[in-house]
Image: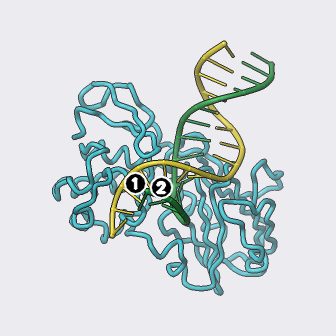
Chain colours: A cyan, B yellow, C green
Amino acid sequence: MPELPEVETTRRGIEPHLTGRAVTEARVLNGSLRWPVPEDLPDKLISQIPRAVERRAKYLLIRFDHGTAIVHLGMSGSLRVITDDSPLMKHDHIELTLEGGQRLRYNDPRRFGSWHWTDAPPEHHALLAPLGPEPLSPDFTGDGLYHRSRGRRMPIKAFIMDSRTVVGVGNIYACEALFMAGIHPQRAAGRVSQERYRRLVSAIRDILSAAILDGGTTLRDFVNSEGKPGYFAQSLSVYGRGGEPCHHCGRPLRDRRLGQRATVYCPRCQR
DNA sequence: ACTGGCTCCTGAGGGC
DNA sequence: TGCCCTCAGGAGCCAG
């Protein structure tokens, strides 16, 4: 399940294969993703040269001279670069062939992902415009979070998973960051002190940076652009460890659903 | 303005 | 071995 580190890992993996190589063929094998893939996407891409692959939140932006392809991996999406003639796999939905023969294949069993095209600057796109700060950028601060959270009664976990608060904090890293910061996931966002928000911001930064260095968390089906799994899963402190002992105090971690999401925390270390 | 619930989809895993 | 059931989840959307 791609979260920000997985998307960044994918970006780094595909960018060198894409930039500067014209698209010679674009095929949409199954355009029925979360939103229908634009009918004219292949026409937009053919003969055009990717200039850069960027990331905003969990969106990948493939930039061309005349516009940008916006790609979201959803829950189970992956992009792979194929350099030989390996056959299409089940759930390969989109394939771009590049000058030189490389192919970029988008695979997504659950089809929660999406592809968009925009001629305008991508930051103006309806999906990107409302997004909050990047977690690894200087505009993401504990003080900013603190002020934004005043009066908010939603659980802190839901608050930090809201992309208007900060982007790229999905369920796994929300659980991990709250554990690291010692904050109970169900505590009302408006009842967390400024000092604890500073700690939480550090925790989110640390955990996302570490996960990026490790090539992303591998749970179920994440593979990077070479089809290889990441190695961060073994570093997780709480996610997926419900009932097992807390690394700090040894008591069993609690596993409950919070807002339709699996939530694991230590009832003793997190208040 | 907030908040919580619903929804899309497939594959994994458990029970029998 | 195989079938059926439940669950997992990103994030936009909608109702209250």
Counting residues from the start of the chain, the first of labels 1 and 2 encountered is 2
Per the model, the C-alpha gap separating discs 1 and 2 is: 6 Å
Q: Image point 31% across, 71% down: which residue?
A: A139
Q: Residue at x 27, y 66 (%)?
A: A148
Q: Secondary structure at mark 1?
A: helix
Count of numbered circles on the image: 2
The answer to whether residue A80 is above or below residue A128 is: above
For label 2, the SS is helix
Residue for badge 1: A208
Name the residue rendered at 30%, 44% in the picture.
A186
| Residue type at the position of mark 1 | Leu
The part of the image, by quadrant, that contains residue A131 is bottom left
Residue A101: percent from the left, percent from the top?
Answer: 79, 66
- The reply to whether residue A235 is visible in this rendering is no
**Residue A149 image point, x, y percent:** 26, 62
What's under tag 2, amino acid-wise?
A: Pro
How crowded is the residue under tag 1: few (<14 C-alpha within 10 Å), some, or many (20+)? many
Q: Give coordinates of residue A64: x percent, y percent.
A: 64, 81
Which one is in front, A45 or A163? A163
Q: Nearer the viewer, residue A13 or A68?
A: A68
Q: Is residue A114 visible?
A: yes
For the residues bearing labels 1 and 2, Cβ distance under 8 angstroms: yes
Residue A3 placement, left or right of A137? right
Residue A176, quarter of the rendered image: top left
Q: Quadrant of the C terminus of chain A?
A: top left
Q: Is residue A191 above or below residue A218?
A: below
In the picture, the disc for residue A5 is 2
Mark 2 nearby-residue class (10 Å; few <14, some 14–19, many ≥20) = many
Q: Quadrant of residue A74?
A: bottom right
- Identify the subunit bearing mark 1: A
